[in-house]
Image (cartoon, grey):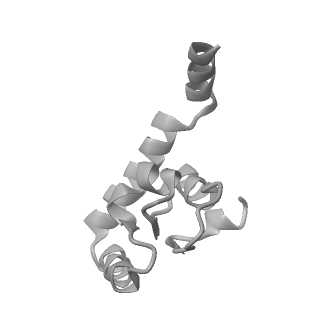
Amino acid sequence: MKNISTYKYAVHLMPTIAAGTFSLNCAYYGIPCIGNKDVDTQNICHPELSVDVNDVEGALKLAAKLRDDADFYKKCAIGSHFLYNKHYTEEVWKIKMEKML
């Protein structure tokens, strides 16, 4: 987590769907992450940066847009952090768990 917090952008196009912690950790810090749209945490926290797993050209276009368009970068950064807080904070999970129990 300490290391990831030093970056401005992230790309994670893994073809396998695992826990999705990379995109989740990026959202925690407000780091825009381009990634596999089939990963729940990617889709939830970075919806505008979610691409098909083999869509390298789409990922490159998004990376260029993040680099060149300050407003888009800011929207994605703030948006990902907001969505993290909306869906994944400890308080949110406590409420979800209480409802389940």
x then y, percent, for residue 5 = 63, 62
Q: Nearer the viewer, residue 75 or 47?
A: 47
Q: Nearer the viewer, residue 5 or 93?
A: 93
Is 29 placed above or below 84 here? below
Q: Quadrant of residue 57?
A: bottom left
Quadrant of the drawing holding the N terminus: bottom right
**Outermost front residue:** 16
x then y, percent, for residue 22 = 61, 61
Quadrant of the drawing holding the C terminus: top right
Residue at figure coordinates x 56%, y 23% from the top left: 96
Residue at figure coordinates x 33%, y 79% from the top left: 58
x then y, percent, for residue 63 = 38, 79
Is 63 placed above or below 1 here? below
Task: Give the mark count.
Answer: 0
Q: Nearer the viewer, residue 97 or 84?
A: 97
Residue at figure coordinates x 31%, y 82% from the top left: 61
